[in-house]
Amino acid sequence: MKKIFILSAMAALVMSSCSKSDDEITPVSNQMQFAAEYPTTRATASAFEAGDAMGVYVSQYDGEVAAPLQVSGNYANNVKSTFDGSKWVNSPAIYWAEGKFDVFAYYPYDKPASVDEYKFSVALDQSTPETADALSGYEASDFLWAKATGISQMDAVPLTFSHKMSKVVINLLKGEDYEGDIPTEAVVRIHNTVPTAVVDIASGVVTKFGYDSAKSITAKKVSDGVYTAIIVPQRLENKLPLIEVLSHGVSYLVESKFVFRSGTQHTINLTLNNNPDKVKIEIGGELEGGWE
């Protein structure tokens, strides 16, 4: 019986080996790997962390002609690539072939119904903390994008991400007649902005979704007197209520025109006074390319 078992096992192994051609057995070293980074930091002010996931599309050239990105029918379609703490793991795996490729990547991972009109919305409450199952409201709003063009087989495809939304940092300052300390538990809201964007994943261009209504966004507290939020790039042509600070039952509201630029960090200083109607707003500098 023992000999029969061994022979049967060997026969099964031979049959299994014969059922696959050499072309179907692809070594792990032939898998497409990614090295993701960005100029400074992402929304969490740190590097990518274990469990972070990005979406990846790969299109294959026809000779020297780049193929247009499609929602499906590409060489790889919205593959979920998850960072395990040291490397990105693709599910399913992507294997190299002959020729050249374009790679498009975005973060955080989602399931876009379109690659040229992908609807992405920032959170209305960006003060919500991260949980075991979900990003914080602030980080989930920070859309990152990268592209590698005309590449062929290499050890790891470099993907340099950039921010595509707009970021605002709000500093609360004391006026000359403001009594006491700056409130440490204030609620800061940004009013009259549209929270939905239309993203072209092929180009990384982000525009305001014209059919959504303006809403209010609750900012995340960074430290005492400092708040921040991610905003869809857009232009406020008219002077409207823009920022509101709620503290101890008192509302400090300022109106202003504003242009939220893609990939730009804006700084706004609000000087509070005892009279809520006399809040002074000062638009500070802009930081492009990377955020602190």
Image (cartoon, rainbow, N blue to C red):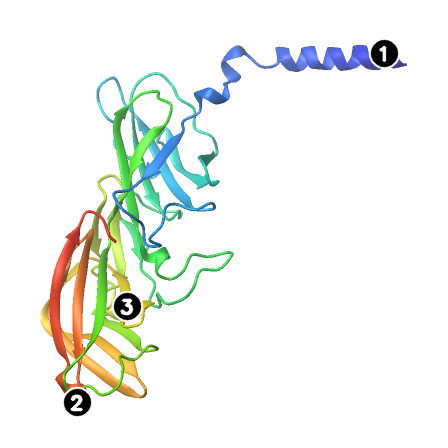
Q: Which comes before the other along the chain, label 2 or label 3?
A: 3
Q: Which image quadrant for residue 162?
A: top left
Residue 37 or residue 235, whichever sits in front? 37
Q: Amino acid at mark 3?
A: Tyr
Q: CA distance from mark 2 to mark 3?
A: 22 Å
In the rendered image, residue 231, in percent from the top left (x then y), is placed at 24, 61
In the rendered image, residue 96, in percent from the top left (x then y), is placed at 39, 21
Looking at the image, do the residues carrying marks 1 and 2 touch, with CB atoms under 8 Å apart? no
Query: Which label was assigned to residue 4?
Result: 1
> Which residue is drawn at the image coordinates 28% and 63% (left, top)?
229
Q: Which comes before the other along the chain, label 1 or label 2?
A: 1
Q: Amino acid at mark 1?
A: Ile
Within 10 angstroms of label 3, few (less than 14), some, or many (20 or more) residues? Answer: many
Within 10 angstroms of label 1, few (less than 14), some, or many (20 or more) residues? Answer: few
Q: Which comes before the other along the chain, label 3 or label 1?
A: 1
- Residue where numbered disc 2 is placed: 275
Q: Which quadrant is home to the N terminus?
A: top right
Q: CA distance from mark 1 to mark 2?
A: 94 Å
Q: Which image quadrant for residue 81?
A: top left
> Which residue is drawn at the image coordinates 29% and 21% (left, top)?
100
Query: Which label was assigned to residue 227?
Result: 3
